[in-house]
Image (tube, rainbow, N blue to C red):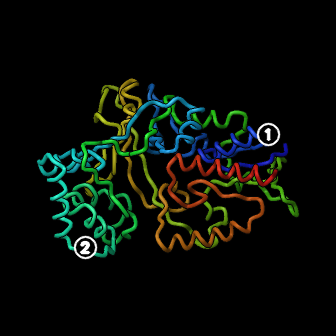
Amino acid sequence: MKYDYLIVGAGLFGAVFAHEMKNAGRTCLCIDKREHIGGNIYTEEEHGIQVHKYGAHIFHTSDKKIWDYVNQFAEFNHYINSPMAVYQDEIYNMPFNMNTFSKMWNIRTPAEAHEIIERQKAECQVEDPQNLEEQALSLVGRDVYEKLVKGYTQKQWGRECRELPAFIIKRLPVRFTYDNNYFTDPYQGIPKDGYTALIGNLLEGTPVRLGVSYREFVRESAGEAAWQSEEGDSFGKVIYTGMIDAYFDYCLGALAWRSLRFEEEYLPDCDNYQGNAVVNYTEARIPYTRIIEHKHFVFGKGAGTVVTREYPAEWKQGDEPYYPVNDDHNNQLFAGYQKLAAQEKNVLFGGRLGQYRYYDMDKVIEAALEMAASELNSSC
């Protein structure tokens, strides 16, 4: 077969691009090194429960066009993200709102909460934050920082807060209302049949080969603009959604990431382990950052319950990358790879790994649609 595009990665970006190309009459072949489609939003049914195998994913957007687009491929429920936070023997609502402040200081009114936060901010005397700790203190004061930010952030990034750059938390959401809705986007929810079904619908009509890495699958045809697989398939262009530094064999050095490790447990005799889908553990002494109870994403459906503990981890080559470390050094390194990418003939880099940035799902879809539209317009 001769395909117009080889799409490397069967995640959300690649699936949206494939769908748009198929609708426009273009041919695509999609490959993925994993044994499943869906990338990091992959869900798997276990005991009647859709389990988020790579961490919790809640779809949210303020863009009605994106919401209408994604609803073509899945029916969404009305799940609202309202995580909890545990500190020692205390439990708090997230994001920081009047429920949080009422519990923390035994107060009732927004004026009382505002006065305490402003007083604590003034006591910290931080005018020009030089690190994450100073930035957090200047935004929320000492109590909220010590109980709900410090330990969690140290675990997440594997560094003391004083060693982390201030830009990581340019802002912290502080609401003086009794509102536990983490996102302010008007459109929120989770696919009732899981994200894997959504990706499958996007990829309908596009051949997919799993368990195949790009380097194993493709060899460049000498003197030609196309690529050819060992099986003889050829491609006009490559849409690469893997790690951009890996594509170039780390020739400039490896970009830094934070990784995650998941510890999953099925509790057949427990119908409700923690009463909420996501509970954060903010003390540094507790090794995991949160526990996910998957059945609460679909309002308690399923036999027993499945919980996942999420452990942050240092990343090394071969591990799964989750969060880019977008400090000055790595941003400069990425800029170097972008220059190399611009010189690649007929290769386009997309998605979280290809563009070295954290993407919400709606922004992934938007970027994939933009790339597809650009490709179609350029060939008219």
Q: Can residue 241 be seen at all in this image of the molecule? A: yes
Quarter of the image holding residue 70? Answer: top right
Disc with the residue nearer the chain's start (2 vs 1)? 1
**Identity of the amino acid at label 1?**
Gly
Residue 247 in the image: above or below residue 336 = above
What residue is shown with label 2? 126
| Quarter residue 73 falls in | top right
Please tell me whether mark 1 sits on a helix, a strand or a loop.
loop
Q: Residue at x 33, y 51 (%)?
A: 289
Q: Quadrant of the N terminus?
A: top right
Residue placed furthest toward the left: 106
x and y percent of residue 26 in the render? 79, 43
Image x and y of residue 183, in percent = 39, 45
Tell me if residue 274 comes above or below residue 362 in the rendering: above
Q: Which residue is mark 1?
A: 25
Q: Percent x, y for residue 182?
A: 35, 45
Q: Secondary structure at mark 2?
A: loop
Say what amino acid the circle numbered 2 marks.
Val
Q: CA distance from mark 2 to mark 1?
A: 58 Å
Residue 208 position, x and y percent, is 70, 40
Image position of 256 with respect to 152: above or below: below
Q: Residue at x 61, y 52 (%)?
A: 367
Q: Is residue 15 left or right of 305 when viewed as pictured?
A: right
At 68% across and 47% down in the image, what residue appears?
Answer: 212
Graded by Cα atoms within 10 Å as few (under 14), some (14 to 19) or many (20 or more), the crowding at tag 2 reads: some
> Is mark 2 in CB contact (under 8 Å) with mark 1?
no
Picture residue at 52% right of the left edge, 46% below the top: 361
The foreground one among 274 and 69 is 69
Outermost residue to the front: 111
| CA neighbours of label 1 inside 10 A, class few (<14), some (14 to 19), many (20+) | few
